């Protein structure tokens, strides 16, 4: 009868019967998992939007629509990240040229302004990525801590038993192993997402770098006329 009752233990019952330390570990891992999935979906939409906006801006700029883009350089309001980089460089270029700064210094100043804007935009794009990296690397160890603690309590509880059976040990070990499973459940998506997002951000950064170099060449030609 005792073995049958243990076999009827559900996941919820195992969690409910866990010690306070194991429950705390499970709650922490659950919170980390929920936050990770929220950040994963947020970054998916953010990076997709950044990629589409960069493609649209480059299409307009190199496709002959740069005059319209130049007309809104001094407009207020944030636009796409790539356009913000362009606007920063163009504003600095105009300001230094109007002051009569030497040609080489004008282009270099515009390049520095674009680089500063680029760093601000990339900081926003990369925000919260360290959290995914932390969850991916730490969660398995947190889950292991809960498992070790749970198994330790299970064996301590059996120390006073006159006769030890598998039915007595199994529930304690099972509830302890749930912590490890939750740690892996939190870590695996976070690691996969972090690697993918890092790759996409690197591609996006390379795209911005190429545009800044090409636009700097245009400014050098413009200042040399």
Image (cartoon, grey):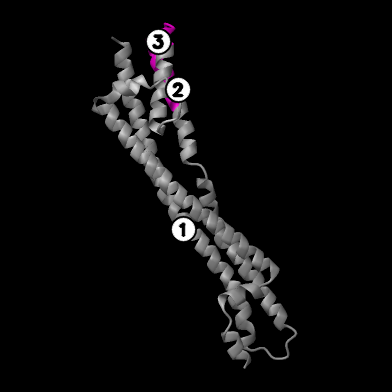
Q: Main secondary structure of the magenta part?
A: helix
Q: Residues within 10 Å of mark 3 (few under 14, many from 20)?
A: some
Q: Identify the residue at horizontal 49%, vertical 32% (top origin).
A: 120
Residue 153 visible, this angle: yes
Instruction: Please name the residue that numbered disc 3 is placed on.
Output: 97
Determine which quarter of the picture holds residue 172: bottom right
Q: Which of the two discs, 2 and 1, labels the residue nearer the N terminus?
A: 2
Mark 2–mark 1 Cα distance, whole angstroms, equals 37 Å
Q: Residues within 10 Å of mark 1 (few under 14, many from 20)?
A: some
Residue 101 visible, this angle: no
- Magenta stretch, residue numbers: 96-115
Count of numbered marks: 3
Q: Residues within 10 Å of mark 2 (few under 14, many from 20)?
A: many
Along the line of sight, the residue nearer the viewer: 87 or 218:
87
Q: Position of residue 186 (x, y in %)?
A: 52, 60
Q: Position of residue 33 (x, y in %)?
A: 53, 58
Reply above or below: 199 against 100: below
Mark 3–mark 2 Cα distance, whole angstroms, equals 14 Å
Residue 179 is inside the magenta segment: no
Q: Farthest residue in the left direction?
A: 63
Instruction: Please name the residue that numbered disc 1 is placed on.
Output: 189
User: Which numbered circle lies on residue 113?
Assistant: 2
Determine which quarter of the picture holds residue 73: top left
Q: Identify the residue at horizontal 60%, vertical 61% (top origin).
A: 142
In-image side of 78 versus 52 (left or right): right
């Amino acid at each position: 009868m005792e073995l049958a009752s243990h076999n009827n233990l559900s996941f919820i019952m195992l969690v409910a019967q866990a010690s306070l330390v194991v429950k705390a570990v499970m709650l922490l891992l659950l919170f980390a998992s929920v936050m990770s999935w929220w950040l994963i979906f947020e970054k998916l939409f953010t990076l997709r939007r950044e990629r589409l906006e960069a493609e649209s801006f480059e299409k307009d700029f190199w496709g002959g629509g740069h005059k319209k883009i130049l007309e809104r350089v001094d407009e207020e309001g944030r636009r796409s990240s790539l356009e913000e980089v362009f606007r920063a460089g163009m504003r600095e270029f105009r300001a230094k040229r109007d002051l009569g700064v030497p040609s080489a210094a004008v282009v270099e100043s515009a390049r520095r302004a674009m680089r500063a804007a680029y760093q601000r935009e990339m900081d926003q794009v990369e925000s919260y990525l360290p959290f995914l990296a932390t969850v991916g690397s730490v969660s398995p160890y947190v889950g292991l801590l809960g498992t070790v603690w749970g198994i330790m309590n299970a064996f301590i509880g059996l120390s006073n038993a006159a006769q030890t059976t598998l039915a007595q040990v199994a529930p304690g070990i099972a509830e302890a192993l749930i912590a490890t499973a939750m740690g892996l459940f939190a870590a695996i998506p976070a690691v996969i997402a972090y690697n993918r997002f890092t790759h996409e951000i690197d591609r996006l950064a390379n795209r911005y770098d190429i545009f800044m170099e090409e636009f700097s060449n245009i400014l050098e030609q413009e200042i040399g006329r």
